[in-house]
Image (spheres, rainbow, N blue to C red):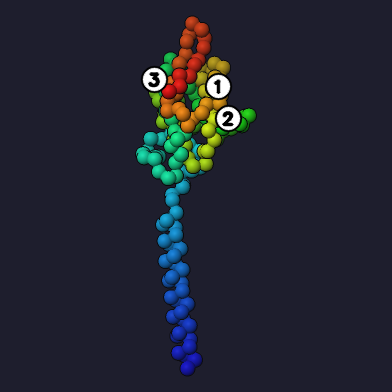
Amino acid sequence: MRKLIFLLAVSVVGVTCVWLTANISSAAADKPDTSWTSNIWDTSAAALPTPTPDSNPELDFTIVNKTGYPIKKLYIGVASSKDWADDDEVLKGRKFADGASYDIKFQPKAMAKKWDIMVEWADGSANDEWLNLNLTKIEKITLKYNKAKDETTAEIQ
């Protein structure tokens, strides 16, 4: 009789373990892959080929450098923040050459509507900033430099 009770108990525990394992595995399979969300945007073209539930496409935009000069660093930060953080820098060591463009793709954590942009020039010129940009209404920003006026502007589309 003890042997029968023992076998019955082992069977119940085994079935419970199999059920728990199956439910844990299916829950993990249902969870979206968020391994790429370490930063609030991703500038690589391969990162988000199409909008997914894990992206925030209403903030996505393209930035174009038509200044005649390379950009060393490109910062994009929430407008309410006062300082530029290393996490705000999107080029991550790559140069942003004249004539080049970057597709900026925001990730779910990025929910603010107003954003600031700052560029640091490769030649050491003073940084330029554009503040309180409503990215929900912007698809493209083209940076331009007027040498005669010594003025950098951002054309918003």
**Mark 2 residue element:** loop
Q: Mark 1 sits on what residue?
A: 129
Residue depicted at 43% across the width and 21% down the height = 142
Residue 80: name its quadrant: top right
Amino acid type at mark 2 = Ala
Q: Mark 2 sits on what residue?
A: 79
Amino acid type at mark 1 = Glu
Mark 1 closeness class: few <14, some 14–19, many ≥20 residues within 10 Å: some
Amino acid type at mark 3 = Gly
Residue 132 in view here? yes
Q: Nearer the viewer, mark 1 or mark 3?
A: 1
Please state the horizontal and vertical placement of residue 16, each as a whole percent of the image: 46, 74
**Mark 3 residue element:** loop
Outermost residue, front side = 137
- Mark drawn on residue 144: none
Going from N to C along the chain, the mark reached first, 1 or 3, is 3
Label 2, label 1: how far apart the Cα atoms are? 11 Å
Q: Are marks 2 and 1 in contact (CB under 8 Å)?
A: no
**Mark 1 residue element:** strand
Please state the horizontal and vertical placement of residue 89, each as a whole percent of the image: 52, 31
Residue depicted at 43% across the width and 30% down the height = 61
Which image quarter holds the C terminus? top left
Going from N to C along the chain, the mark reached first, 3 or 2, is 2
